[in-house]
Image (cartoon, rainbow, N blue to C red):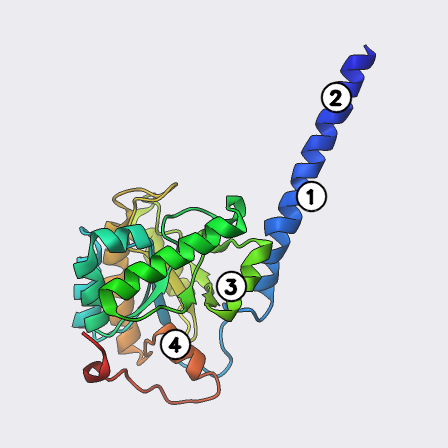
């Protein structure tokens, strides 16, 4: 009986150690960046314009359709891409850049930093930087970790990368409720200074492979309504540069490296 009690106490000790470890390693750091000023997360007070951001691509089925939609409406957005997918579909990355979109990092693979060692996170970042540099000839500096989760050592990367989260998430990686559910959430929070996160691929853990189809349908109606109301769109780098300005200057596409 004493052995059983000892084992039970030991098991509880292990569980508490794990919970405390997670709290220190990932839960508290993630809370700090979401509540603090370490990332482009909260809505700006003086910036006028919605920042559309897209995670998990490029996807050969849905990303080209998304690029067509954005081009039709003259919208420049920000794409947080996975290095492994960029390596597989470099032509989509080239098109993103040629059409004036900003490209950021979403890790090489869609693995959460909560379970990665500092060394593995660094490799995820550097491998993706290398891929994009090989395709476009420059190194990206904007970073959104999968699920917006970081670990304690990720603060060390903030000297090299600008962390970017969001102010509005609509759950568009799910198919439940279809287009109407996504539209309802987008229009319910229709404001002119949101950072909206959407997903142009449904190939990650917990996502539905067909979910981007509904996102595209909802986004079409959303951008049309924003245009009617005169609400502009901007890239993350524009948003950060214009925190203390009132005029949004479009990106000069002729100055971009093809």
Give the alpha-carbon distance from disc 3 to disc 4, as whole Å: 18 Å
Query: In the structure shown, which secondary structural element does the residue marked by tag 4 occupy?
Result: helix
Q: Which residue corresponds to mark 2?
A: 8
Sooner in the amino-acid sequence: mark 4 or mark 2: 2
Q: Position of residue 83 (x, y in %)?
A: 32, 54
Of callouts 3 and 4, the N-terminal one:
3
Crowding at mark 1 (Cα within 10 Å: few <14, some 14-19, many 20+): few
Q: Residue at x 39, y 73 (%)?
A: 236
Cα gap from disc 4 to disc 2, whole angstroms: 53 Å
Secondary structure state at the residue bearing disc 1: helix
> At 44% across and 62% down in the image, what residue appears?
168
Q: Which residue is mark 1?
A: 20
Separation of disc 4 and disc 1 at Cα?
36 Å
136 relative position to 29: left or right: left
Query: Which disc, if any, is residue 157?
Result: 3
> Element at badge 2?
helix
Q: Is residue 232 left or right of residue 125?
A: left
Of residues 251 and 140, the one drawn nearer to the viewer in this rendering: 140
């Amino acid at each position: 009986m004493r052995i059983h009690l000892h084992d039970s106490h030991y098991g509880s000790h292990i569980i508490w150690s794990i919970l405390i470890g997670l709290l220190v390693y990932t839960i508290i750091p993630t809370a700090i960046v979401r509540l603090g000023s370490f990332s482009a997360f909260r809505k700006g007070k003086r910036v006028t314009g919605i920042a559309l951001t897209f995670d998990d691509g490029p996807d050969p089925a849905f990303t080209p359709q998304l690029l067509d939609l954005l081009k039709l409406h003259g919208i420049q957005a920000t794409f947080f891409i996975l290095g492994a997918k960029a390596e597989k579909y470099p032509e989509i990355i080239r098109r993103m850049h040629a059409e004036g979109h900003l490209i950021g990092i979403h890790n090489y693979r869609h693995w959460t930093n909560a379970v990665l060692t500092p060394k593995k996170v660094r490799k995820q970042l550097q491998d993706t930087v290398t891929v994009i540099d090989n395709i476009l000839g420059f190194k990206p500096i904007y970073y959104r970790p999968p699920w917006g989760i970081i670990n304690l050592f990720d603060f060390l990367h903030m000297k090299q990368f600008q962390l970017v989260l969001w102010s509005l998430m609509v759950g568009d990686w799910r198919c439940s409720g279809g287009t109407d559910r996504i539209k309802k959430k987008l229009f319910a929070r229709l404001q002119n200074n949101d950072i909206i996160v959407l997903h142009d691929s449904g190939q990650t853990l917990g996502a539905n492979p067909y979910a981007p189809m509904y996102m595209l349908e909802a986004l079409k109606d959303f951008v049309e309504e924003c245009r009617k109301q005169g609400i502009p769109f901007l890239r993350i780098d524009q948003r950060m540069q214009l925190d203390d300005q009132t005029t949004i200057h479009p990106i000069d596409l002729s100055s971009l490296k093809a």
